Image (cartoon, rainbow, N blue to C red):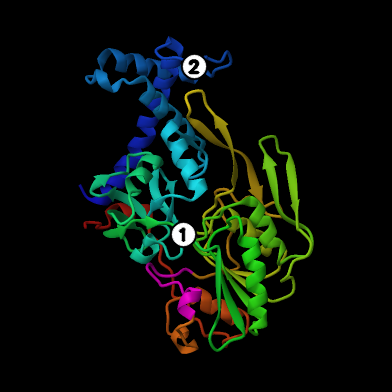
């Protein structure tokens, strides 16, 4: 079967199968097949009855009795429920093993390819590769859909199962088969796993200009300290304007989003946080910002998510600087962890983030002031690369988003950047395109 055929078929089937497993989980609890039993709520909607009907039919007629595993069906039911909530890539259920993996992630002691992976339309999708990571060096791009891992189809697997297959020991190889929508084809990418170490921020002067490029890789625990230090170094080196690169920044800590954004603002809110009852909490700008007047342009793309979107939305709402690039990912829920009785956990989006003007981030993302879509596979210039480049090298390169930022800051003549016409792929074309390996 062609790869894209797998995508479309599995996407359709997932909704059907996961709904069915949800019903099975409800009946298992009702009939006491495992302990502790799930209690049926008195106000349970009558629509649940059809799930119990499906369970009874499967119990009586399904050919593979071993597949009627209470725990697997329960977890499948929960995952189907979570998927139906529509908070893709954020709200999620973790099995006991997945809880252990989550703790490893927080400690930072793990090996892998160095990319944030989420679910879009029921398919495992690269949200963003981390700067300098094995995934980044191998050419993995934000928006790549993961079809296979080491030849095993993962389009029907849970996100955690997919991630488990991608992880492995340092120095070992993993082969991803990905579908890249912009290229309209699939490809295999071989990656050598390594320990993931990501600098919070890096910078360099842009050759031939008085502008510094500051790359914010993620909003980790020391980003604000790094940014304050970098801004001082950049201005001492002669920078009179800044390009803040948040492309492929998957986010991080809310506290750091507030602190870093506050370095560029003087008053007002950084964001609003709204709970399920509509109550809003204000997160005001912290005083003492070190870059409240220097001209800035912010670069974003579809790999900019979570805290990166908070930063971008605040800069835009306060008219502090222009946003250049592509609409961001659209992750804007606050996860509250709930520990469950068997060691599993539910990370539930109980609040959502809004920009200072009340714009919803979740599912919408932040639209740039100047839209510049880069062609698939275009090289994003990093601070490290700038150290070996001239302005002519930059002008001859593919990073039109960075060049547009320089144009807006007056570092290169207006009209220098020629943005190619963008083509879109409609659903029918997507189904018909040839994606053979």
Q: Is residue 56 above or below residue 406?
A: above
Q: Can residue 33 be seen at all in this image of the molecule?
A: yes
Q: What element carries label 2?
A: loop
Q: Position of residue 17 (x, y in %)?
A: 35, 30
Quarter of the image for the C terminus: give it: bottom left
Q: What stretch is highlighted in magenta?
A: 373-386
Residue 134 magenta-highlighted: no
Q: Is residue 378 magenta?
A: yes
Magenta stretch, main secondary structure, is loop
Q: Where is residue 432 in the image (x, y as percent from the top left)?
A: 27, 54
Q: Are marks 2 and 1 in contact (CB under 8 Å)?
A: no
Q: Quadrant of residue 20?
A: top left
In the foreground, 162 or 4: 162
Q: Residue 122 carries which label?
A: none
Residue plotted at (52% across, 76% down): 402
Mark 1 Cα shell of 10 Å, populated few (<14), some (14-19), many (≥20): some
Q: Name the residue under label 2.
A: 38
What is the x, y in percent for residue 88? Answer: 48, 43
- The residue that mark 1 highlights is 197
Of labels 2 and 1, the one closer to you: 1
Residue 263 rendering spot, x and y as whole percentages:
71, 65
Q: Which of marks 2 and 1 is nearer the N terminus?
A: 2
> Marks 2 and 1, how far apart in space?
42 Å
Residue depicted at x 36% and y 43%: 164
Q: Which residue is drawn at 44% across and 70% down?
A: 374
Give left or right: position of 67 versus 402. left
């Amino acid at each position: 079967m062609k790869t894209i055929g797998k995508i479309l078929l599995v996407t359709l089937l997932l909704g059907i199968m996961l709904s069915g497993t949800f019903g099975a989980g409800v009946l298992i609890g009702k009939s006491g097949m495992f302990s502790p039993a799930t209690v049926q709520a008195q106000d349970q909607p009558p629509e649940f009855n059809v799930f119990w009907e499906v369970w009874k039919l499967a119990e009586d007629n399904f050919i593979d009795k071993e597949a009627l595993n209470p725990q697997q069906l329960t977890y499948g039911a929960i995952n189907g429920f979570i998927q139906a909530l529509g908070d893709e890539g954020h709200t999620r259920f973790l099995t006991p093993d997945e809880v252990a993996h989550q703790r490893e992630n927080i400690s930072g002691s793990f090996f892998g390819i160095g990319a944030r992976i989420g679910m879009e339309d029921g398919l495992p999708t690269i949200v963003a590769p981390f700067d300098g990571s094995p995934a980044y060096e191998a050419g993995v791009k934000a928006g790549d859909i993961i079809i296979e891992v080491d030849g095993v189809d993962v389009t029907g697997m849970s996100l955690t199962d997919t991630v488990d297959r991608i992880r492995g020991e340092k120095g070992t190889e993993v082969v991803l088969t990905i579908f890249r929508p912009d290229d309209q084809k699939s490809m295999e990418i071989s990656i050598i796993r390594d320990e993931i170490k990501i600098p919070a921020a890096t910078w360099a002067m842009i050759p031939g200009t008085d502008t510094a490029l500051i790359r914010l890789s993620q909003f980790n625990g020391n980003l604000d300290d790094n940014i304050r230090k970098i801004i001082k170094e950049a201005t001492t080196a002669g920078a009179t304007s800044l390009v803040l690169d948040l492309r492929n920044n998957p986010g991080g800590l809310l506290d750091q989003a507030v602190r870093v954004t506050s370095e560029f603002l003087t008053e007002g809110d950084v964001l609003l946080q709204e709970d399920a009852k509509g109550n809003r909490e204000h997160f005001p700008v912290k005083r003492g910002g070190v870059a409240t007047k220097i001209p800035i342009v912010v670069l974003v793309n579809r790999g900019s998510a979570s805290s990166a979107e908070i930063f971008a939305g605040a800069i835009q709402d306060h008219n502090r600087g222009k946003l250049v690039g592509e609409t961001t990912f659209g992750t804007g829920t606050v996860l509250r962890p709930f520990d469950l009785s068997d060691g599993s956990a539910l990370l539930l989006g109980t609040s959502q983030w809004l920009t200072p003007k009340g714009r919803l981030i979740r599912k919408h993302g932040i639209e740039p002031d100047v839209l510049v879509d880069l062609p698939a596979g275009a090289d994003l210039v990093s601070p490290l690369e700038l150290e070996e480049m001239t302005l002519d090298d930059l002008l001859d390169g593919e990073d039109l988003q960075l060049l547009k930022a320089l144009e807006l800051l007056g570092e290169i003549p207006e009209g220098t950047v020629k943005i190619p016409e963008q083509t879109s792929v409609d659903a029918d074309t997507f189904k018909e395109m040839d994606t053979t390996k």
